[in-house]
Image (cartoon, grey):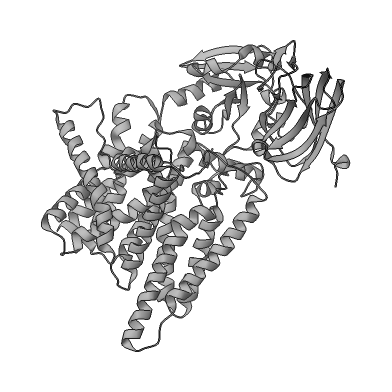
Amino acid sequence: MLTRRWLPLLLGLNLLLLVFYLLVDYQLVYHSDSAVKNLLAQEIYETGQYFPLEWNYVNHDLWVFYTQTFIIPLLPFFHNGYLLHVASDLVSAAFILCGSWLLTGLLEQSRLARLLGMLVVSGGMSLIMAEHIYGQAAYGSMYYMACFLIYAYWSFSQASGGKRLWWAGATAVLTLLVFWANPQRALLFYGLPLLAGGAVQQALEWRAARDERRAVAWRQAQAMGVVLLGLVAGTLLSAYTLSRVNSSQGLTDMHWLNFDGMAHNLLGVVNGIVSLFDGIPRTDGKVASLKGAYAALRLVGALLLVCLLPWGLCKALQPRRGPRQLVVVFAAVSFAANLFVMVATSVADMSSPDASVRYLVPSLLYMLLIFVGLMVDRRAVQPMTRAAGLAAIALLATSAPSSYLYPFNEFSHLPRRGLILKTPDLELTDFLKQQGLQYGYGTFWIAGKSTVLSSGAVRMRPVSLERGLPLPTRKLSSNRWYTPAAWQGPTFLVVRDHELQYLNQPLLASYAGQPRVLHYQDATILIYPRNLAAVLPNWDNTVRQPVHYRMDANTLHERGTIADGVITAQPGEAGALHFGPMRMLAAGSYAVSFDLDASGDGQGDFGMVDVVTQTGHQVHARQPVAAAGKQRITLQFTTPNTLDMVEFRAFSSGRGRFALSGIDVVRIPQAQEKP
């Protein structure tokens, strides 16, 4: 009765709540990271390039078969708004649930265990876990790709005849896709776990063949060979694609930690996993109440899972052949490898554990499904352990109402426009439309989501405020957005009131003219008569128009004083008179001119000027300043690839007076470029 009626009904309820979460509830927590899938799909559609040449990927992470893929076919027929985001997430959710069902089949679980596992996966577990799996769907996508890859691998190793060729192709293609996207990540999340599982199965087959005095079947070795073929092909495709597109390092600067740092990260991992299982009570909640009692249960359940999931994984590991052990070894290696990297290196920022622990989300999902089967189908578990495990599982399986309805319950009073809630973000885009504004700029957490929420009627491009001026935020953005040709006419800049302190409005006005100023909610909207991209330095990375850098209060320097547009180092002041501006330059040839004035007894060494990247480790052009007097030194260089964090530097030797009054950058026309 439980399997046939009640569990399917509960699963149906979870799925309905999941659809509600994606369609309605997620609007209340929608953010610009989630909006990137829509923006990239639009860029692909407009350029006709699946890997747009002007797009800036991050950390060498190519979006191959990812969430934007499901939006692209819809763009000829619909506006690129929030509902297309929902359509993409519904496809991802279907793949996640399908992959989970296939994985529980490989785990050889009973129907009861499989349904209970589906309840856990479909229940969301917590608001942050639902975000990782279904909302932004980043780690949900990685999870279902792993499920499909494991299933294809095992099916190939067991198939015969024509089906064997079909499953070999599926295994190779899936491996190629994940390694094409990011070989380093794929090795950690897919390659090593699957090859380790296959190697264990092949070793067990060899031992069994020896004991039974028969020939060894090399099916696992052949399947691993197909995986290695896909691995190599995907890695080569990734290298080729990255050579043609733009990719920056992003926020990841990985290095080893000391012991204290590792201990801190390990505690952060525990904190994050407890948060993923909704085990951290809200600090403003009442303890002596029904909600308080439920929060206590969730805390105990989450702590139990922190202990029981690794225990269950170890208990499930057995020297047996079959798909079940393939999945268990895959999960164990995936979890161990990711945990090691998170604890021993700086890859995870533990100032926000519930966000940083996202790297473990796919592994935790495998482990949960294995644990459900262990608790339901195995009899070699102590009754108290089974009872505790089943209770924790029951809490997760019934999480959907708290995971999917929490934001909506808090803001159910908001007016609606059909299925679309009139959130403050949507009201801001409506206000901009009412003012006739169509193209402008805003900080990252405003820009992307506003563009999608307006269905593209208001296109807002992300910028950061650096040294008083807006600067393009190019990561996960297109260079096309920041060129004068992108928009002809007035543009606007939206700045939250708490960010205004970082904007030098007089300096910006000196470039762009006096703006018309509007205020709405907690935002200040500055409207300029022309596109900011046409007047601000550092915006056009192709330097279609010459760029002049003034010496003013925002000039980056270590030595010297600034007066009347000149920065001057006196004798004895040795060091960097100018560095920065940390800009991008597209492939091509450039001339960088420094207006200098040197005097005194410099003995033929007043200083040096150069053009560098990689914080000075890569020098593109350099020249010493040997002569006294006013002079203009021009450095020319050519780059075959886009450069990031470019600096134009001037150094004083301290042997004389050394002054810099300006730097000019021009692009050398192609006919004059050096071969």
Could you say where residue 174 lies in the image, as x and y percent from the top left?
49, 61
Q: Is residue 572 above or below residue 11?
A: above
Could you say where residue 650 lies in the image, as x and y percent from the top left?
74, 27
Number of on-image labels: 0
Q: Residue at x 58, y 17 (%)?
A: 503
Could you say where residue 610 lies in the image, as x and y percent from the top left?
76, 33
Viewer-proximal residue, 512 or 437?
A: 512
Quadrant in the rendering for residue 192: bottom left
Viewer-proximal residue, 284 or 430?
A: 284
Could you say where residue 87 lies in the image, as x and y percent from the top left?
45, 45
User: Is residue 522 among the parts visible in the rendering?
Assistant: yes
Q: Residue at x 56, y 49 (%)?
A: 62
Viewer-proximal residue, 331 or 55?
A: 331
Q: Residue at x 30, y 71 (%)?
A: 319
Q: Is residue 122 above or below residue 572?
A: below
User: Is residue 115 among the parts visible in the rendering?
Assistant: no
Viewer-proximal residue, 47 or 600?
A: 600
State which quarter of the image contains the N terminus. Answer: bottom left
Task: Indicate left or right for 89 with 599 as reference.
Answer: left
Task: Indicate left or right for 114 with 204 as reference.
Answer: left
